[in-house]
Image: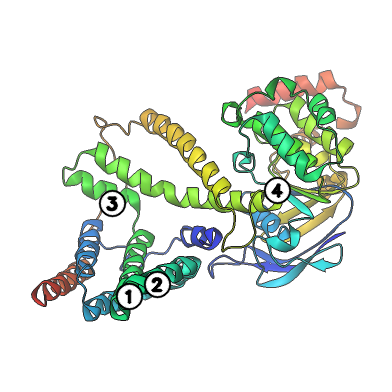
Amino acid sequence: MLSIENIWYRYNNNRWVLRGVSLNLSKGIHSIIGPNGSGKTTLLRIIIGALKPQRGSVRVFGEVVKGLKSTANTMVYVPSNPTMFLVGPSVGDDLRKAWSKGGGIDIDDIVEFLEIRHLLQKKIFELSEGQRHIVSVASSILLNRRIIVLDEPTVGLDREHREKVIRVLREFARDKIVVMASNDLRLAMACDTVAYLNNGNITIHGSPNEVLIRNDEFFNNDLLVILRHMANRGVNIETLNHRDIIEILGRLLCST
Amino acid sequence: MLDLRRIAQTFMVEGKRTAIHNTHPILKISGTAALFVAILFPNILIISIVLIVSIAESLVAGVFRRICSFLWGIRYFLITITVLSLIFYPPKRVLIILLRVIAGSVLVLCFVLTTNMMDLAQALDRLGIPSSITYATLFSIGLIPPLLKNASNSYEALVLRGEASPRIIGGGIITPLALLVAHAIERGEKLAEVLASKFFSPSGERTYFRSLNITVYGIIQLAFKLAVLIFALTSM
């Protein structure tokens, strides 16, 4: 169990970035969403012990996190720039190094699952941003820690690879706590729970559907608004099939 | 040896506008240069004056806490310098060396934290300094904060990966450093492409959106700092 208890944090005496954040996360995949600058990365860095909150504490399986030293054997953290996580020099070397420190999970299984065999001989700096994200997720799983913390793991990934990231975490990190900060709605919808962080606080935490229904702030520019817009125009959205939706969306796009 | 997290946080941008922030960049850089030359003289009194002036300015500009945080971040480096110096030099000279490092750090940080680099570019541009030199220098300086942030992030990730030690003293710095250099090169290449696409080339003419004014404070601070330099020169 990962318990975040009443965390308050601010940088250099500026405004509070986090204002009393509390969250309890058990085994499963959890997403922290929120607008840019809402404090998602700061919260992740507090969880791993890189930042010390001014108030509150983080407990990992009952023990208070007291810096990176205390989490070094329990957690793995992949920053939003995965280049800073991959030690290479080649993809194969990187995966082997991660496996040698973790063990328990077969490299070949993950390589096959993610279909990255063709990347094994490549140097890290020859990879695209998206490929680096995929490899970093694979390495983080191979390290076999009880908690995996990922910052924006799907930036630069196409739909197929984004789904693969979720599937690989479901397949190989079933018994772990996976926490990720993301602005990717589709990723959030595939998680077990979603926490919405805004103005330094978690305003909603629940299943993706629950958050989608209750949250007007984050989804106000997305499909929900379009559906509401259609409903306001007298369209009965419950009886629509996908062809109707595409046609109406097309008309809406042309009229705006 | 270096507390990268603390150092990176020093350079986080703040939107403050004080008299020191509003000082014309050329007057400010001239004053800073004058004081920098002054601390090169091995005179405790002059170095102390520079330190006091720099601390006063940083207090007015509201960046003093960040400078203190930076100095705390390099505390082990300062201790190492002190210990090594004590082996080779007498205590008075060690004191001068230490004061010089601290005064120099406060002086330069106060300038960097209160100066918009694009304002400085504009001022240098108007003085007729080739933009290839100006931009190359300023963008290199501008790359330091994001690189420090990356270094800090990288260090955290690598500690948890087991590739670096969580201890500040004696921690495995080679891997994060190698990654940082590789990343800096990659970032530099991308930056060059971006700049070329935005006409930051020697032949490109820039439009600046902020006007720079010479304020009374700017002139007074420069006069005072030049006086300190003259005092240093005459007291040799």
Numbered disc in front, either 3 or 1:
1
Numbered disc in front, either 1 or 4:
1
Which residue is rendered at x = 33% and y = 30% of the image? B199
**Cβ atoms at labels 1 and 2 below 8 Å apart:** yes
Q: Answer left or right for A156 relative to B136.
A: right
Q: Which three-letter amino acid code belongs to the residue tagged 4?
A: Arg
Q: Which three-letter amino acid code belongs to the residue tagged 3?
A: Leu
Q: Answer left or right for B116 relative to B43.
A: right
Decide which of tag 1 and tag 4 comes sooner along the chain. Answer: 1
Q: Which residue is mark 3?
A: B120
Q: CA distance from mark 3 to mark 1?
A: 35 Å
Above or below, A30 against A59 in this view is above
Which residue is rendered at x = 15% and y = 74% of the image? B232
Numbered disc in front, either 2 or 3:
2
Asked where in the image residue A101 lies, by quadrant, the reply is top right
Question: Foreground: A83 or A18?
Answer: A83
The residue marked by circle 1 belongs to what chain?
B
Q: CA distance from mark 3 to mark 4?
A: 41 Å
Q: Marks 2 and 3: same chain?
A: yes
**Cβ atoms at labels 2 and 3 below 8 Å apart:** no
Numbered disc in front, either 2 or 4:
2
Above or below, A50 against B71 in this view is above
Q: Which residue is mark 1?
A: B94
Q: Which mark is residue B82?
A: 2
Question: Foreground: B47 or B32?
Answer: B47
The quadrant of the image that shows the N terminus of chain A is bottom right
The residue marked by circle 3 belongs to what chain?
B
Q: Which residue is mark 4?
A: B161
